[in-house]
Structure formats: C-alpha cells, structure tokens
Image (cartoon, helix red, strand yellow):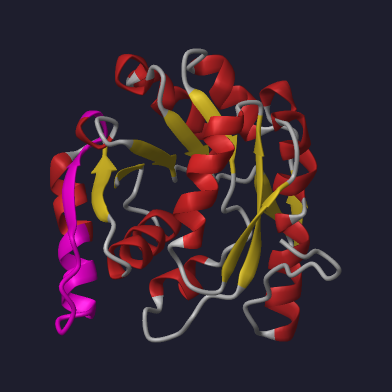
Amino acid sequence: MNVGVLGGTGPAGKGLSARLASVGVEVVLGSRLQERADQACRSIRERWPDRTLPVVGGDNAAAAEADLVVLATPWEAAASTAGSVTKQLDGKVVISMANAITRMGHEFEPLVPPRGSVAAHVQSAVPAALVTAALHHLPARSLADLDASVESDVLICSDHPSAFEAAAALVELIPRLRPLNAGSLANAAPIEAITAVLLQLNTRYHTRAALRFTGIDV
C-alpha cells in the first residue's frame, strides 16, 4: 500500500507521514507547492537520520494518485483541497482527519462546519470518493516522535464498508493503535468535536491524552 497525504506540511500531516513511513508504508507527502512538500520531507529525514523512511514530496495532485489518501489540511481547506483533485480521488478511500476547532482565550471550542462535519463536507466535494472519518484524536507531536509508541483507539466512521476496512487496515499497521467501527459518516460530527476536549485536557495537564475504550473485545 502507498498513501498520499494531502496538505501534509503541517504538524498533523508531517507526524502521520513520519509514523506511517516508520512502519514501512510508502508515503507521498503532498502540498500545494512541491517545494514545501520537499522541505517537509527533508525535515523528517533530518530528524531521524538513522532511519530509512520511504517518504517523498509531491504536489497534492501527485499525492492524490496514491492507493489511499489522507486529508491532513486545516479543516477549512479540507473540502476545497479534495475538490481540487476530484478526478484522482474517484473511487478511492479518502480519510478525513481534520477537526473544526478554534481557540477562544484559554479554551478550545468546536465549530460547526458546512454539512455538520468536516468529513461530510469533504464527501460532498468528492461524491465519487469513499470518504472515511478517522485519526482525529492522535496528537501530532506523539505521531511525530518515532522513539515513542502511540497508544489509542481510533474511531472510524464511513458509509462504505470497504472504506472502513481499508482505514482499519492502515491503522493496524501502527503498533498499539486499535481501529473501532463507530458507524456511518453521520457520527463524524461528535467525534470531530470531542477533539476540543482532548486538547483542553492536554493543555491543562501538560500531557498527550488519547482515547481508550474499555469493555470492547475486538
């Protein structure tokens, strides 16, 4: 499997790209500008010079040619970025990991994006793609720190069973992550919103909290 990360130059995109590459996934880190993508890849390799990480830079169109695509843009750019590469995304699994959140003073607050969730807005922009909501609650700094494991449950929402299976298979490549089927894309709204709570906890307690559900035997 190879994965394209659209808008991969931000903390979430770089962290996910590095983590996936560390488990052998071939990653195309995308950006609107090839130069920014190349710079992000160099920064990943320079941070981990003793590792062979299969991550290369490309523009978003090149990243969208991958077998599976992850949208790691800021939430307000997710739908437009996906729409800019509609043809490449037709029939593909597209994972939306963005959260519509803002900071008001010392508090993080969830916003209500068009169609109720970022993932639903992305699905409307690329109707022929198999959009899946996942990876929202993984702290970017934890993903980027390859010397430490990331431990969390990953809630996955999709209207397409095959898309859930593909997203779950990707999640399972990363040790100590457990994919959970959280239902249809309609459930993406509360899943995206609870990220504001996690950010608040991380800020208050100076940690990197993640979700773990008890009582589920998969």
Q: Nearer the viewer, residue 198 or 170?
A: 170
Residue most extreme to the front? 218
Number of dots carrying numbers: 0
Front residue (pair 28, 217)? 217
Outermost residue toward the right? 215
Rendering coords of residue 97 (x, y %): 54, 46
Q: Mark yes or no: residue 106 visible.
A: no
Left or right of 94? Residue 41 is left
Which quarter shows the C terminus? bottom right
- Per the rendered image, the range of residues in magenta is 41-61
Vertical relation: 159 (above or below) 194: above
Give above or below for 126 relative to 153. above
Q: Can residue 54 be found in the magenta stretch?
A: yes
Q: Residue at x 69, y 66 (%)?
A: 199
Identity of the residue drawn at 17% across and 49% down = 57
Relative depth, front residue between 175 and 140: 175
The image quadrant that residue 19 belongs to is bottom left
User: Of residues 43 and 53, which is closer to you in this image?
Assistant: 53
- Residue at (35, 20) in percent of width and height: 84
Where residue 169 appears, as percent x and y from the top left, is 48, 51
Residue 207, image x, y percentages: 65, 83
- Give coordinates of residue 189: x percent, y percent: 75, 38
Image quadrant in which you'd find residue 185: top right
**Is residue 11 shown in magenta?**
no
| Residue 173 seen by the camera | yes
Q: Please state if 194 lies on the left or on the right of 75 as rendered.
A: right
